[in-house]
């Protein structure tokens, strides 16, 4: 799984759920961003929502718009397309200009067992 659908339970946190119930999606982005949970919508317009659109796929997720994260010592700007991360030229890290797969949650869980 390359995208983990979750829903936010106020006062509790994120709970795994089916894609149809999700109001957020968690991704494992290679590089300095790491694990990131974004608010999503599955239909309608995202205008004024602050949400990303998500195609509903856990194996080959596509999100819009681009994802930008910045820290004290990095900038990471990318497109998420069909389960891959396209790092843009304004990134400040070694993956700038490359396209790589999102990290797989299932593999990470197997390694941790």
Image (cartoon, rainbow, N blue to C red):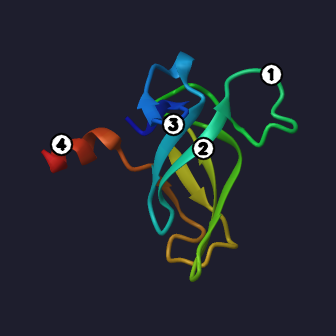
- Sequence-wise, the earlier of marks 1 and 3 is 3
- Sequence-wise, the earlier of marks 4 and 2 is 2
To which residue does mark 2 refer?
38
Check the picture and name the quadrant holding the N terminus.
Answer: top left
- Sequence-wise, the earlier of marks 4 and 1 is 1
Q: CA distance from mark 3 to mark 4?
A: 29 Å
Describe the element under mark 2 as helix, strand or loop: strand
Q: Residue at x 45, y 35 (%)?
A: 12
55 is higher (above) or lower (below) than 49? above
| Disc marking residue 11 | 3
* Closer to the eye: label 1 or 3: 3
| Pointer 4 with pointer 2, Cβ within 8 A | no
**Picture coordinates of residue 99 (x, y %)?**
53, 57
Q: Residues within 10 Å of mark 1 (few under 14, many from 20)?
A: few
Q: Is residue 59 visible?
A: no
Q: CA distance from mark 3 to mark 2?
A: 18 Å
Q: Residues within 10 Å of mark 2 (few under 14, many from 20)?
A: some
Describe the element under mark 1 as helix, strand or loop: loop
To which residue does mark 1 refer?
44
Q: Residue at x 26, y 48 (%)?
A: 108
**Picture coordinates of residue 105 (x, y %)?**
33, 42
**Picture coordinates of residue 89 (x, y %)?**
68, 71
Q: Is residue 66 left or right of residue 111?
A: right
92 is higher (above) or lower (below) than 46? below
To which residue does mark 4 refer?
110
Where on the picture, by quarter, is residue 75? bottom right
Q: Residues within 10 Å of mark 3 (few under 14, many from 20)?
A: few
């Amino acid at each position: 799984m390359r995208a983990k659908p979750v829903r936010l339970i106020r006062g509790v946190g994120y709970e795994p759920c089916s894609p149809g119930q999700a109001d957020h999606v968690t991704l494992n982005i290679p590089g300095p961003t790491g694990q990131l949970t974004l608010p999503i919508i599955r239909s309608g317009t995202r205008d004024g929502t602050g949400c990303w659109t998500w195609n509903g796929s856990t194996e080959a997720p596509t999100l819009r718009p681009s994802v930008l994260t910045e820290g004290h010592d990095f900038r990471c700007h990318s497109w998420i397309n069909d389960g891959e991360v396209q790092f843009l030229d304004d990134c400040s890290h070694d993956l700038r200009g490359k396209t790589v797969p999102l990290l797989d949650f299932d593999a990470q869980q197997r390694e941790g067992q």
